[in-house]
Amino acid sequence: MTNPKKEKVMPEWYRFEAEIMHLDYWVQTIAWYFPRDIMELTRDTEFIMANEKKYHPEVTAVAMIGYYNRPDSYPLKSADRVELELKTILEHGCNNVFVYSLNDVLRTPEIREVFKKYFKR
């Protein structure tokens, strides 16, 4: 495909996500794999909630919490810390949460219990 006007051209995969699925972004990292200031989590959650429908009215904001149980590579977050991060996200209006790494959450009983407390079947 030629582009004589040098217009910005979206890659085909992005067009699929953005136009067909009505996504601008599907998840924003709010709580990183290391502890961040709670005011930053609050600010970032409020930002994604305020902008979730900016480009597509069908979009729903999703906040990501990062958790690794790999103390040799990442700071280990306590269950209290993970709960504080989760409560901050939920209290500021974001009810859709994505967690990575789910495997680390599932193999860490105290962290698994935090998520079970807030996300019941």
Image: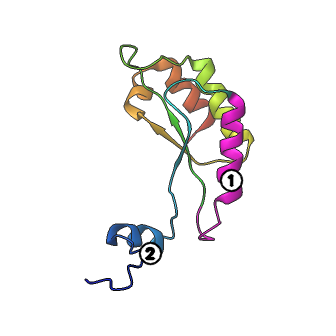
Task: Please identify the dominant SS of the magenta region.
Answer: helix
Q: Nearer the viewer, residue 111 or 92?
A: 92
Identify the amino acid type marked 1: Met
Q: Nearer the viewer, residue 12 or 66?
A: 12
Residue at disc 2, secondary structure: helix
Q: Nearer the viewer, residue 50 or 58?
A: 50
Say which mark, if any, is on residue 20.
2
Q: Residue at x 59, y 48 (%)?
A: 96
Residue at disc 1, secondary structure: helix
- Based on the picture, tell me whether residue 92 belongs to the magenta stretch: no
Direction from residue 13 to residue 106 in the image, left or right: right
Question: Residue 49: x, y in percent?
Answer: 68, 53
Question: Residue 115: x, y in percent?
Answer: 56, 31
Identify the amino acid type marked 2: Ile
Q: Residue at x 66, y 47 (%)?
A: 94
- Which residue, given by chain and number where applicable, does mark 1 sit on? 49
The segment highlighted magenta reads 38-59
- Based on the picture, tell me whether residue 48 belongs to the magenta stretch: yes
Instruction: Give the crowd class for mark 1: few <14, some 14-19, many >=20 residues within 10 Å.
Output: some
Direction from residue 36 to residue 33 in the image, left or right: left
Label 2 to label 1, Cα distance in Å?
22 Å
Question: Residue 3: x, y in percent?
Answer: 32, 83
Direction from residue 72 to residue 105 in the image, left or right: right
Question: Residue 22: x, y in percent?
Answer: 51, 70
For residue 63, above or below residue 32: below
Q: Can you say which quadrant of the picture contains the N terminus?
A: bottom left
